Image (tube, helix red, strand yellow):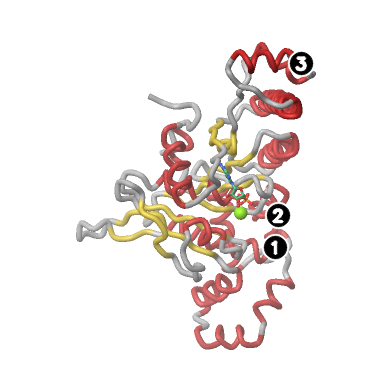
Amino acid sequence: MTDQRWPAALAEARLHVVSGKGGTGKTTLAAALALALAAGGRRTLLVEVEGRQGIAQVFDTPPLPYAEQRIAVAPDGGEVRGLSVDAEAALLEYLEMFYNLGLAGRTLRRMGAIEFATTLAPGLRDVLLTGKVKECVGRTVGDGRGGRGRVPLYDAVVLDAPPTGRVVKFLDVTKAMGTLARTGPIHSQSEGVVELLHSGRTAVHLVTQLEDLPVQETLDTVDEIHEAGLPTGAVLVNRVRPSRLPATALTGAATGAGPGTAGLRSGLEAAGLFLKDEEVDGLIAETVEHAERVQVEAAVRSRLDAAGLPQLELPELAEGVDLGGIYELAELLREQGVR
Ligand SMILES: Nc1ncnc2c1ncn2[C@@H]1O[C@H](COP(=O)(O)OP(=O)(O)O)[C@@H](O)[C@H]1O
Ligand SMILES: [Mg+2]
């Protein structure tokens, strides 16, 4: 059975880029996605590129060094590793790889030349970060059968990416390269990055909440992603709260045309609840607010639907998101077809 919320094409993706308006839940859902994709004894890597140590916070571990570390175990034995990529370390690693600059690299670091190089060339930082991500996606290990066969180290890599305002520029390596090197190892490495990012092995997911601004940014970013020729993934609708009113009562409630204080009071008294006037008024105000919110949600939802992308929904966790919450969200992603 195929679930259109997570179509077969997404199950093929090896690199899952997670963006969204700031604060909508990118880090939270990138973590839950990495955990969901690790189910069934698989191995995934969760990568952050902005040095905020958000992954360590979410998984309640010490700050991540620039090295892959196991940060969580999926219920049936899968494993999530975490990596905090730092552009300077990536540049050194890169120079080392191509120019064998062990000692020179250390000297460079001492001289602050790295900072110089990365501030000098706009875009170089992003190319280094995406280059490292690509290296992780492509890394292989022996297949464990003693022969020469090799298999990917990671079944999937999940990138906690920059927010919607910056993500397309971040991923549009071709543009950055136009102003950097036209030949040489950085150039050929970046060609590999471009190839991966524009292929079916990548999916760019967008996290949103059912509010005007995040949804508008999501829709704008979908257009930008398409224009840049990058592959869109799913929209992850986060912090969804249930509607507590029957559809028929919504419009009336939103416009305040409910039963009124006296009507509500008699209804409550019939149910054995005796409240003060201001308590009844408080309830009415809350109901109006709730009804208005549900109406806004319905409106932005239909705008989202028009974008035609697969959608997954994650609920508002009333207790906030602790480690258990990440497992809960991962399970809900699995139930919606994530694999
Ligand atoms: N489904 C949810 N339910 C409750 N709180 C959430 C949920 N998703 C995210 N949050 C909270 O919202 C805040 C922002 O989430 P975060 O993942 O850090 O966003 P971003 O990475 O986009 O800035 C955090 O405090 C997080 O715990
Ligand atoms: Mg974050």
Q: Residue at x 73, y 72 (%)?
A: 119
Q: Residue at x 55, y 46 (%)?
A: 320
Of the pair 127 and 257, the residue shown nearer to us = 257
Horizontal side, residue 193 vs residue 211: left or right: left
Q: Which residue was labeled with disc 3?
A: 260
Of the pair 312 and 115, the residue shown nearer to us = 312
Whole-percent x, y for residue 74 in the image: 36, 49
Q: Is residue 248 visible?
A: yes
Q: Which residue was labeled with disc 1?
A: 123
Q: Earlier in the sequence, mark 1 or mark 3?
A: 1
Q: Which residue was labeled with disc 2?
A: 175
Tally the numbered discs: 3
Quadrant (top left, top right, bottom left, bottom right) of the C terminus: top left
Of the pair 77 and 44, the residue shown nearer to us = 77
Horizontal side, residue 34 vs residue 193: left or right: left
Quick check: 155 above or below 83? above
Few, some or many residues within 10 Å of mark 3 (<14, 14–19, 20+): few
